[in-house]
Amino acid sequence: MSPPGLNSERPVRFDGSRLSLEDVVALSRQERVAELGTSPDFRQRISRGAAFLDRLLAEEGHIYGVTTGYGDSVTVAVPPELIPELPHHLYAYHGIGAGRFLTPEETRAVLATRLASLAQGVSGVGLDLLTQLERLLRHDILPLIPAEGSVGASGDLTPLSYVAAVLCGEREVWHRGERRSAAEVLARHGLAPLRLRPKEGLAIMNGTAVMTALACLAWARADYLCRLGTRLTAFNVVASDGNAHHFDEALFALKPHVGQQRVAARLRRDLAADRPRRNEQRLQDRYSLRCAPHVLGVLEDALPFFRSLIENELNSANDNPLIDPDGEQVLHGGHFYGGHIAFAMDGLKTAVANVADLLDRQLALLVDARYNHGLPANLSASTGPRAAINHGLKALQISVSAWTAEALKQTMPASVFSRSTECHNQDKVSMGTIAARDCLRVLELSEQVVAAMLIAARQGLALRERVAGGLNLSPALASMRHDLERRIPLVEEDRALDRELQALLGAIREREWTLYEA
């Protein structure tokens, strides 16, 4: 049985057909269930690959990682009687991960991504292995995977060793809110530990599943953050009494970056003006408002390109060697190299950090009485004698600045820090998993900036309404403003805002606001 709440009516089918990153995200969030393909063609293809490998072994074929040692040990011949033990040695000696454990969401994505690759039918594995991976997803049996220890080629060896070990009933899992032994949880669900066939240890571990899984999750978070950054910019234009004409359609037709134009169009709709009004007092706003489409537009334009890189990797066979069951070939190569994911994650984290920086600059103007056009300093809503002891959003702005600085610091590209490892066999590596973890950290910090900006938007709109005597908001802005007012009481007396910040972070990560078109 599947965990309660899963949507089994529209499963994500693993049969070698193309998957989207949304499929991985849905599985990671337990919104859909995994289903291994049942068609005879798919199952026969898997079986043919395993049978071809068995035949090669019977004919004394020479296959890397099956009849030889691993990596630089390729020159070491494995005696035939020891070949069955070799896959278990691979995951045993790679059990040297460190750092935090991947979250349940991240771990589900890893299982899905590895299953997608093996379901291509060119890894020489048996159906039992694919079925066991599917069962881990269906029963939510989640290997405890340390996040650190991969250089991104020869794939995610060390983190994926924890998946291999759990399939075989070893190490630990996270299941139903508890940390338990894998053997115990497999037995609870009537699942027998696997005894890996030749090549299966390598097939599980020698690939880009961890970095690709994290990239799928990062992409989805970045897409939502871009939309929220656009909505917040609209709020800040209103709160700052800014110039909506900076987003004029005719203006943006003259610089035809499609994503940038899309951001400007969203701002025009939010500000309810095709030819928006001009503030006659100030012809031009500062860059963080005027150039917001140019900053957000970089991320908006980059997302489709990064999607193509991530989804191509997701739908690839990326272990080594590959076993071609139709041509009956063993193909030795390097598809475990994660360069495309490394590039996508290094680029995505830079574009996301720039959005955090944009919002940080908008907030700096909004809290400063010299630049916010008539609002009180620090957006304090306190009036009368008590205004002297109240400080509004002073500390919130300091925290936003700290989170932004840390996000910007994290943008150093990981992919340029290749290290020669494993006796110079792995002498050029991708660092894709480090890039993906960096990107997730930048997203975490940037989401904190966005959560704080939601508090500031709620406060700034209320104070602008006081000054202006009313606000004429578009339906989209009015609806979201009402929702923010429900979540966040006006800050009139100084109070801790951390609980509200955490609640807003939860709402962001659950994508509780519908923003613009899909």
Image: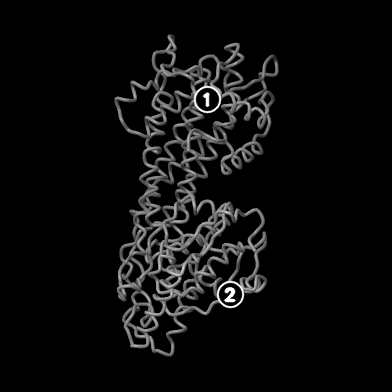
Residue at 50% in and 27% down: 364
Label pair 1/2, CB-CB below 8 angstroms: no
Tell me which amino acid carries mark 1: Phe
Near mark 2 (Cα within 10 A), the count class, few <14, some 14-19 or many ≥20, is: many
In the depicted view, which residue is nearer to us: 21 or 166? 21
Label 2 is placed on what type of residue?
A: Gly
Q: Is residue 346 left or right of residue 474?
A: left
- In this rendering, the answer to whether 256 lies above or below 45 is above
State the image coordinates of residue 414 (x, y, percent, origin top left): 38, 53
Total numbered badges shown on the rendered structure: 2
Q: Nearer the viewer, residue 250 or 375?
A: 250
Residue drawn at point x = 53 percent, y = 21 percent: 474
Question: Which part of the image, by quadrant, shows the N terminus?
Answer: bottom right
| Residue annotated with mark 1 | 235
The structure residue drawn at horizontal position 38% and vertical position 20%, both measured from the top left corner, is: 248
Badge 2 marks a residue whose secondary structure is loop
State the SS at label 1: helix
Q: Where is residue 358 shown, x and y percent of the image?
A: 44, 32
Question: Is residue 226 toward the left or the right of residue 452 in the image?
Answer: left
Residue 223 image point, x, y percent: 46, 41
Can you identify the residue that label 2 sits on? 169
Question: Which residue occupies the foreground of this view, 340 or 95?
Answer: 340
